[in-house]
Image (tube, helix red, strand yellow):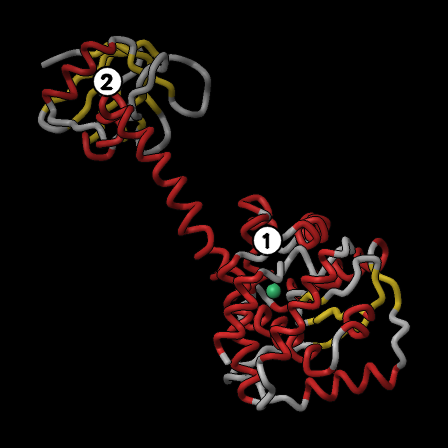
Amino acid sequence: MTTVAGLYFDGRTSRAHRVNLTVEAGVVRLSGETERSCPLDQLHVSEPARHIGRKVTFPDEAYFEVQDAAAFDTLLEQTGYRDSSVVRMQRSRHGILFGVIATILVLVLGYLYLLPFAADAIARHLPAGVERTISKGTLEFLDQHVLKPSRLPAARQAEIVDHFRNLAPPQAGAPSYEIVFRSSRIGPNAFALPSGQIVLTDELAKLLDDDEIMSVLAHELGHLHERHLMRRLVQSSAVGAVVTLLFGDVSAVVANIPTVLLDMKYSRDAERDADDYAIAMLKTNGIPLSHMADAFEQLKRKEGDGGMPYLSTHPPTAERIAHIRQAE
Ligand SMILES: [Zn+2]
């Protein structure tokens, strides 16, 4: 039977014992400066790695460091030991190439499919407190930098709130929301924060008539219903932030949100979903869809005037307007 030279460490002191390792009838024996034996199946053999000697670890953390690598390989063969498939694969060129391709594939597929899926799942399962904290931080930031207190008369604000409250949602499970009025440097605008606050600017309230405002609010409610912003935030905040979110320290994420919000374009799918929600809501309440199309056309025209328009976040494209007109 093969003898493997090496060093034995008892795991408690740094002293090295010069020993030889042999295997007989399923039992490993060390002999030399110290003696020890142990059944083969209780030992752990470290994976082979370049420039690092392999280790055989005993149940009590004592270990044998292989010095004669060739003899050790022979011994492993004799005892029928198999490295894990990963190790065997790493050793072959094809294996390496395969590993690289597989890793890239996993990353690409993960980005395309898993991340949105995970973001959706995370967004749906975040504790309400996290959403509130995030939204509070965002609104505070916007109030400091972009928004000003509304100058819309309280009676007019109440009118808009009541009007929207009296509309029936298009389907069960409508999200809870609160309409928040602000004046802005960003022109006619509306957007929904994850906690359910829908920010409506005075400029938008003045530009549009009531049914048009209802269309915009319904669209925002659609975003809330689908949790688009939260999903988007989770996605764009990437892995580190997700971890942060999960472990509860949201301050770093909060700091990041206004940038994301202002810089963000909802995806075409998200816009389409929110539009469909709004279309269904208007139909449910007998409001002609032409009001919604008119609203977006006016906002689109404003955009042409060079103001900062109804959101870079919901670009009112011709495609969207056509979709609304077709739904009539
Ligand atoms: Zn939108």
For this view, does 125 lie left or right of residue 141? left
Residue 132 against residue 205 in the figure, above or below? above
- The answer to which image quadrant residue 95 occupies is top left
The answer to whether residue 141 of the structure is visible from this angle is yes
Residue 205 against residue 271 in the figure, above or below? below
Ligand 1, what quadrant?
A: bottom right
Residue 133 against residue 295 in the figure, above or below? above
Residue at 43% x, 57% y: name it.
Answer: 117
Residue at 65% x, 68% y: name it.
Answer: 296
Residue at 50% x, 56% y: name it.
Answer: 119
Disc 1 element: helix
In this view, the residue in front, 39 or 212, is 212
Disc 2 element: strand
Q: Which residue is mark 1?
A: 247
Circle 1 Cα neighbour tier, 10 Å, few/some/many (<14 / 14–19 / ≥20) = few
User: How far across and how far down the image is residue 48, in percent?
Assistant: 29, 21
Q: Give, as a three-letter code, the residue at label 2.
A: Leu
**Of the two numbered discs 2 and 1 in the rendering, the one whose residue sits closer to the viewer:** 1
Dot placed on the residue nearer the N-terminal end, 2 or 1: 2
In this view, the residue in front, 71 or 184, is 184
User: How far across and how far down the image is residue 53, in percent?
Assistant: 33, 15
- The answer to which image quadrant residue 70 occupies is top left
The answer to whether marks 2 and 1 mark residues whose Cβ atoms lie closer than 8 Å is no
Q: Which residue is mark 2?
A: 30
User: How far across and how far down the image is residue 204, in percent?
Assistant: 77, 70
User: How far across and how far down the image is residue 246, in percent?
Assistant: 57, 55
- The answer to which image quadrant residue 18 occupies is top left
Q: Give, as a three-letter code, the residue at label 1.
A: Phe
In this view, the residue in front, 163 or 84, is 163
